[in-house]
Amino acid sequence: MTAETRFHVLFTREEISAAVERLAAEIEKDYLGKNPLLIGILKGSFIFLADLVRRLGLTLEIDFVRLSSYGSGTESSGKIRVERGLRTQVRGRDVLVVEDIVDTGLTTGFLMDYLRRKNPASLKLCALTDKPSRRLTPVTIDYLGFTVPDKFLVGYGLDWNQKFRNLPHICYIEEG
């Protein structure tokens, strides 16, 4: 990052809140009477997941996985590492994966394939943002907040080298 780095708001906190409310209503309708297991992908999804579950009037459980494909750069390395695995049984459960961003699809696709092999009763994906212009692996998103342009995003859980997750808006970065 240089002195010329500029942050531009793509989605305000109010727009994000409205999207989370809409997603919660869709999820609540589909999971009514069930006890879904929501799996957050760390670290990026934690803010989104926290806001989402507070809006859900469901009995549910939460677990986390930590996968990595970025390192310290702004481009995916393409190599997925499991840094923290699940602690909860998936077999026979209604599972909803909660992701901050689906970019190339490599990390999300890897996790969805891994979970399918564990035989859940159902498996769906909720993503706050989707960047389809960068997709390398097909991924089906069942609940989507926003489609975003091919820009590097930070804020609301999204980071740049572990920084800027705490910004209340989703911003894109321009340098120079």
Image (cartoon, rainbow, N blue to C red):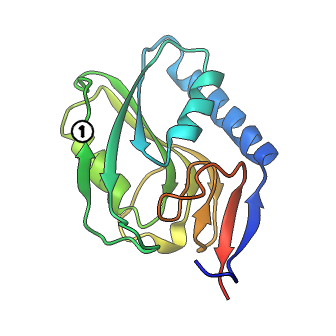
Q: Residue at x 47, y 64 (%)?
A: 161
For the view shown, which residue lies furthest in the front direction? Answer: 3
Residue 40 location in percent, x, y?
43, 38
- Location of mark 1 (residue): 85
Q: Residue at x 37, y 53 (%)?
A: 108
User: How many numbered marks have been drawn onto this rendered protein structure?
Assistant: 1
Q: Amino acid at mark 1?
A: Gly
Q: Is residue 72 left or right of residue 153?
A: left
- When asked about the image quadrant of residue 42, the answer is top left
Q: Is residue 79 left or right of residue 38?
A: left
Quadrant placement of the C terminus? bottom right
Q: Is residue 119 left or right of residue 106?
A: left
For the view shown, which residue lies furthest in the bottom direction? Answer: 176
Residue 24 location in percent, x, y?
63, 30
Q: Residue at x 51, y 55 (%)?
A: 101
Of the pair 27 and 4, the residue shown nearer to us: 4
Quadrant placement of the N terminus? bottom right
Q: Residue at x 70, y 83 (%)?
A: 4
Q: Is residue 78 left or right of residue 16?
A: left
- When asked about the image quadrant of residue 109, the answer is bottom left
Q: Secondary structure at mark 1?
A: loop
